[in-house]
């Protein structure tokens, strides 16, 4: 045996031993994902196939990529957390060349010793069979020669492409190649998405139906999903509580963000559900303010904090607005209490059968009436931009999750998030300028009402002020002043 082969085998053996890392025990299991695929299969049209692609790898800078985040539909159906994969789910049983029957097939990244040394472990096709329970699992390089006649199906269901996938010339089975190979196999028109949609009646390609099917499935949470969502919500609530205790004038927006996100990591939340929004003063009037640059928070300001931990793929979405000084001013309290009253009005009707539009209308009536009483607008019917967004959306594998937006159903999980944002120079009286308040909570729709999942985080002015008086573990956490630190050699 030559020296190179010995080294290769030893290295492969060491990698194999390293592929049993300590991992959380509460991931959704392969039986759950299998059941989800079956639920999808039951909803597919006759003689059809549904095709799902993994998310693309996104480049951050030069040879550094963003941390990979799987496509939520792909994760929902498989539990596979790697890129460069394609999943096919058939309505009816298919037959292999050897006569075996199957109704699903997946093509995944192959094992690659050298690439795994650099970018992490891969399941490979055998690991996919064993750990994910998809028995027809092959390396993605085999998809090109996989013999499937897409024209034999009445419908080929998939989500249309955005043409934003990079081609890794060194990887013949990357996502770019999988998509191109599918297009050839399926007879995908080499035109823009609008043209494809217009031509669908002339072929069997369907880029619309899968959206509604996945909305139906993902909009109603299973008990296993609710367990993960509850953890994500509680972690996010604890982050809000710890910031309330730690808040002091002079802190930066980024420091506040860091406390939240440290709590998330402390509880093993893998990611953020969305970029953290931490806006002090007038920055809170920017609905999706993610710069978080302000170096010193003013004691006269409010700070709006919209953050959500992502736990095993499932994300919370919680917003609290608190006074930097620990005490609301009279004007801040008036606006805050108005937003809170709007949220509670929607909570009263948050139950199965209520429409999403009714929830918004309930919040808007309270806010418009209150703004008129405060002389911020002339009358409740006035058009304005002080409440410029909707109040409710699904949460789950996406922060704005898939789901139907007609009426509430049992086991949906939604937000209720009214807000008022008063930018400078928009009211006659400047005492209101720069006040921005959003209160956002997460709710599980129950059989006859709703469960307030995020109640752990204080949301009345009295409860917030009381919490902000509590000591923080960070009170004595002091770091050196960079301008005064002198480097010392050994």
Image (spheres, rainbow, N blue to C red):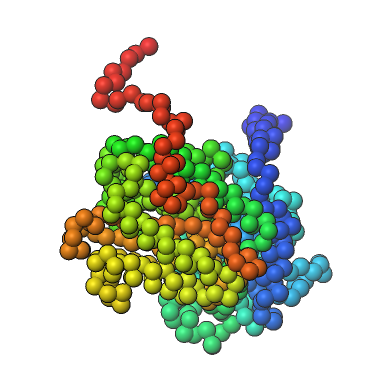
Q: Is residue 129 above or below residue 473?
A: below
x then y, percent, for residue 79: 64, 55
- How many numbered callouts? 0
Q: Nearer the viewer, residue 65 or 24?
A: 24
Q: Residue furthest toward the right?
A: 99
Q: Residue furthest toward the top?
A: 490
Q: Nearer the viewer, residue 296 or 219?
A: 296
x then y, percent, for residue 393: 49, 66
In this orientation, does residue 473 appear?
yes
Q: Nearer the viewer, residue 294 or 356?
A: 356
Q: Is residue 279 above or below residue 218?
A: above
Quadrant showing the N terminus: top right
Q: Nearer the viewer, residue 57 or 4?
A: 57
Query: What residue is rendered at 61% in x and 77% in y?
Result: 156
Query: What residue is rendered at 44% in x and 81% in y?
Result: 195
In this orientation, does residue 243 appear?
no
Quadrant showing the C terminus: top left
Q: Is 202 on the left-hand or right-hand side of 6?
A: left
x then y, percent, for residue 190: 46, 76
Q: Is residue 460 above or below residue 416?
A: above
Q: Residue furthest toward the bottom?
A: 202
x then y, percent, for residue 371: 30, 67
Query: What residue is rendered at 25% in x and 54% in y?
Result: 434
Query: What residue is rendered at 37% in x and 26% in y?
Result: 478
Q: Is 402 on the left-hand or right-hand side of 336?
A: right
Q: Is 476 on the left-hand or right-hand side of 206?
A: left
Q: Quadrant of residue 14?
A: top right
């Amino acid at each position: 045996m030559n020296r190179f082969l010995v080294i290769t085998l030893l290295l492969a053996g060491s990698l194999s031993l390293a592929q049993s890392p300590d991992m959380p025990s509460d991931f959704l299991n392969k039986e759950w994902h299998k059941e989800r695929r079956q639920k999808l299969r039951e909803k597919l049209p006759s003689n059809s196939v549904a095709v799902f692609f993994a998310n693309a790898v996104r480049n951050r800078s030069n040879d550094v990529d963003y941390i990979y985040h799987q496509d939520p539909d792909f994760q929902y159906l498989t539990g596979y957390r790697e890129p460069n994969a394609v999943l096919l789910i058939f309505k009816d049983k298919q037959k292999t060349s050897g006569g075996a029957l199957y109704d699903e097939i997946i093509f995944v990244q192959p094992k690659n010793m050298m690439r795994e040394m650099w970018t992490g472990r891969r399941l490979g096709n055998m690991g996919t069979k064993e750990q994910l329970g998809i028995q027809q699992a092959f390396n993605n390089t085999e998809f090109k020669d996989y013999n499937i006649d897409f024209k034999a199906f009445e419908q080929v269901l998939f989500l249309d492409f955005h043409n934003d996938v990079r081609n890794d010339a060194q990887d013949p089975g990357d996502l770019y190649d999988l998509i191109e190979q599918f297009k050839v196999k399926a007879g995908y028109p080499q035109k823009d998405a609008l043209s494809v949609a217009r031509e669908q009646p002339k072929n069997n390609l369907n880029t619309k139906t899968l959206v509604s099917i996945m909305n139906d499935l993902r909009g109603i949470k299973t008990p296993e999903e609710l367990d993960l969502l509850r953890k994500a919500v509680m972690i996010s609530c604890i982050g809000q509580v710890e910031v309330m205790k730690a808040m002091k004038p002079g802190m930066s927006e980024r420091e506040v963000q860091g406390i939240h996100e440290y709590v998330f990591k402390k509880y093993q939340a893998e990611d953020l559900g969305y970029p953290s929004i931490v806006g002090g003063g007038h920055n809170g009037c920017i609905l999706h303010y993610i710069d978080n640059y302000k170096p010193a928070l003013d004691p006269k300001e409010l700070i709006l904090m919209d953050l959500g931990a992502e736990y095993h793929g499932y994300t919370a979405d919680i917003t609290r607005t608190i006074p930097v000084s620990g005490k609301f001013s009279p004007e801040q309290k008036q606006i805050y209490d108005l937003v809170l009253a709007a949220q509670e009005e929607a909570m009263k009707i948050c139950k199965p059968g209520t429409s999403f539009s009714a929830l918004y209308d309930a919040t808007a009536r309270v806010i418009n009436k209150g703004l008129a009483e405060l002389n911020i607008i002339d009358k409740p019917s006035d058009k304005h931009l002080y409440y410029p967004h909707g109040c409710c959306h699904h949460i789950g594998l996406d922060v704005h999750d898939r789901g139907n937006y007609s009426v509430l159903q049992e086991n949906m999980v939604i937000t209720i998030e009214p807000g008022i944002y008063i930018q400078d120079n928009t009211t006659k009286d400047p005492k209101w300028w720069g006040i921005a308040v959003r209160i956002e909570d997460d709710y599980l729709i129950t059989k006859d009402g709703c469960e307030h999942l995020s109640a752990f985080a204080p949301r009345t002015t009295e409860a917030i002020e009381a919490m902000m008086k509590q000591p923080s573990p960070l009170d004595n956490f002091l770091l050196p002043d960079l301008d005064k630190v002198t480097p010392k050699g050994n």
